[in-house]
Amino acid sequence: MTAIQSGAQRGTRNIRNYALALLACTTLAGLPQVAMAQEASDPAATTGDPAEDTATDPQSDVIRTISVRGVQRLEPNTILSYVRMRPGDVYTAAAADQALKDLAATELFESYSITNEDGNVVIDVVENPVINRIVLEGNKRLKDDKIVPEIKLAPRQIFTRSKVRADVARIIELYKRQGRFAATVEPKTVQLSQNRVDLVFEINEGPKSRVQKINIIGNEHFSDGQLKGEMVTHESGLFSFLKGNTSYDPDRLAFDQQKLREFYLTQGYVDFRVVSAVAELTPDKRDFIITYVVEEGERYKFGNVDVTSQIRDLDGDALTKGIAIEEGEWYDAKRIEDTVEGLTELAGQFGYAFADVRPEFRRNPDDLTMDVTLAIREVPRVYIERIDVNGNTLTQDKVIRREFRSAEGDAFNTLAVKRTSARINSLGYFQEEFEVSQAETANPDRIILEANVQEQPTGELQLSAGFSSLESFLFSGSIRQRNFRGRGQTIGASASISRYSKSINLSFTEPYVFDRNISLGVDFYRRDVNSFNLINRDQTRYSKVTTGGSFRLGVPLTEYSSLIGSYTLNYDQVTIDEREFFRDVDGNGTTECDPLLASRFICDTLGNRLSSILGLNYVYNSLNSYYRPSRGMRLTAGVDFAGLGGDTRYVRLRGQAAKYWPVMGDFIFSLSGEGGYIKGFGGNGPRSDEVLLTDRFFLGEPQIRGFDIRGVGPRVLRQPITDDGTGNPLVITDRDRGGDDAIGGNAYYLGRAELEIPLGSGAREMGLRPSIFMDVGALFNVNKPQLQSSPFPGGIPIQARDQSGNLLYDSGTVDSNGNVVTTTDSVDGSGNPLDIIVQRNIAPFQEVFVGDSASPRISVGIGVDWNSPFGPFRIDFSHVIRKVEGDDTKTISFNVGTQF
């Protein structure tokens, strides 16, 4: 591999050598003529012989032939066409010099020269090689697919140095755009046969040039920190990875100047200007120092602000009264811009699609006020001529058209167009940030609405695995088609398994039944949930298997609200390990749940039940995004009635509300709340209003952070009793040594305030979204359960059984560890009958009921969402400010998963 040698330099050197030679020859040739001229001027030197006085023959410098040597690919005639020499011309140094320049201009030759032998001119050339391939080496930060489009040379093209230099400059400029001003590119060639070369660009990317310091000169009313906060570019430092945009970019430098001007205009400084903005490299050429020189000028206030209108439907005086700008307030260009936008939208609501609102400014330098007149020019009212849908190949036209809030022939309305764009976006079938466009027609009062969509895949196949502080390992899979057959229908299936639950679900949704604005949905499912002891989570308390289905029907009430009716049929099977929690009640093999072993409230829950549930829900939704809302509100309120057949009887009320605001720039503040109440009726026994354990509400992680799963609300604590050493009972209140069973509640409330904190582009690229929060909630209102106890001392003996439920008998022997050896045989080895049933004692304990309080539990903390390389990750650090006896707290909770 050899470095490229400049053919132009060699050509220049050859030209210089030949020019000097020609000049010397011309000088030497001219000397006899000068002498002859001198002799001719001297009468004494004249011989008088005409033959001797004849001048030199001029035909000796005439070009007789021109030939080309060294050509391989080019035709000689092609090369001769590039030069101006022709046979019959007089050969001169100037003509040879011009011919060399003509050859250099073609950039086809590595070297070239011209010789003249008695009028026979020979052009010697060495052609530039052909590029075999182009190779990039050393590029790590920028991949080949980013650099190759910038390279204009290509394989099978003629290698020229000027084009190589241009490509090098473009590559370096590309690295400068990435903030790497120290990047260098060295082109090299690898010689191949048949005058071919491999062109190699050796790239040294160098370090990223960051902004070391930003200096601002001339600012008197605002600090450097305030102004730097308005800029897109930030200084590099310890936490620069969170701020982002710390590299130097000349485009950002210009944009920052505009940002400074916008800031000052919102503060009343209408004469503000950036005098200069200079970016200087540090001596080591690694970082930049940027210096702004600004001139703030005087600060202005609003003077008279009014509206004039040439549109008859808009009264200028009435609009003037509605402007939220008072005379005497500091001038703010952003408020003027927002007012213009609002007036434009208002005119659009009356059908004036091309409303022209022009602000007119009158500066009063004497009292430093700015008068503003917002002039609404006369324009024709516009009607919708037609609606075009373009770009959809799978999705049927009607799926898109039914989302339009305007029809052909209607007056144009900006709000209807915006709502249409939002509804089509919410489908999720097309490109992000879709907007309905407007096209003019030949008639000034007609307009065409166009939905130019770009379809994207709507089928989803997802397999996920993860780990959480609650469920340990989780595995799930789902398949869903959100635009089935292009009709807008959704069909899906999913399954999941974790430490404490398993589920499978099939679903189908038709948003427009028979092309009417009525939605229909059907779900079939099976869920298997194991309840665990909060202290010993390896101990399963009971299992609930639910098999069922639901049918729902939705009818819109307004543009943002709808009413959804549903019917659900569930078959619940609640079981417990009979070997551990059942006992013989009559000595004849009849067994039942023993409250001393499993607690009374669990024994009362066991059994199979059929639930027939009617539901009605009201939904209001004006959120701007379903997944990451930043503005809008969502409200739901519903009632469920169980008792139309089946075995359960209750009425359940639930409500939820959430509202989002953008505050302080890019911060997102949200308030949400929810609550519920369930009332049982018509049951059997003394507690006819009792709600089953499995139908109650539970509260804890993840609903209210800072508390463990089901860590809030009523619970039964089983506390062991031991001897204090003097024969008296001692109750052990250590929660880790006893039992802890959450029994749920019939009422709950939950509130949350959260502020999402924006970070720099660097953190956003990493997918980090931190937030601070406060959660408030409570779970309460449940009938006090029947508590059990095993008295001190001695406890209560019970009969022991094997895994098959058979009574165990004492064989009369002990093993090597001193334990009694038992058998299910009724006789011993000698055939003697055994009638001693093995018994074990339930150690002394007492049960206490705690946590049934409406007093608010309060926690505060900080959480971070991270789209990590191995999947979405959420971690919360919480501190409980207020709790009630019995509540289980938790400082850190997290969840992580991945998709593959």
Image (cartoon, rainbow, N blue to C red):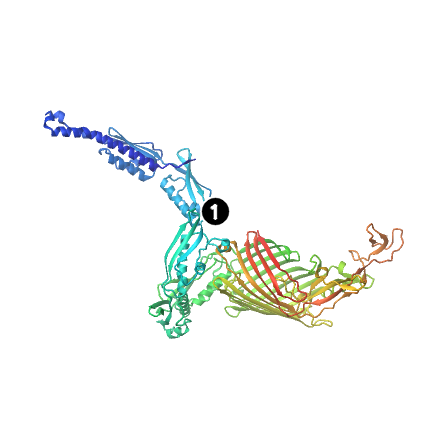
Quadrant of image for the N terminus: top left
Q: Which residue is mark 1?
A: 141
Judge left or right: residue 836 versus residue 546: right
Q: Position of residue 57 (x, y in %)?
A: 18, 28
Q: Secondary structure at mark 1?
A: loop
- The answer, for residue 593, to whether it is visible in the render is no
721, above or below 6, in the image: below
Judge left or right: residue 386 versus residue 38: right
Q: Picture quarter containing residue 645?
A: bottom right
Total count of labels: 1
Q: Position of residue 888 (x, y in %)?
A: 66, 63
Mark 1 belongs to which amino acid? Answer: Arg
Q: Position of residue 420 (x, y in %)?
A: 46, 64
Q: Picture quarter containing residue 727?
A: bottom right
- The answer, for residue 732, to whether it is visible in the render is yes
566, 228: nearer the viewer? 228
Q: Position of residue 72 (x, y in %)?
A: 35, 33
Judge left or right: residue 875 versus residue 268: right
195, 208: nearer the viewer? 208
255, above or below 79, in the image: below
677, above or below 494, in the image: below
How packed mark 1 is, by other alpha carbons closer than 10 Å (few <14, some 14-19, many 20 or more), is few
254, 517: nearer the viewer? 254
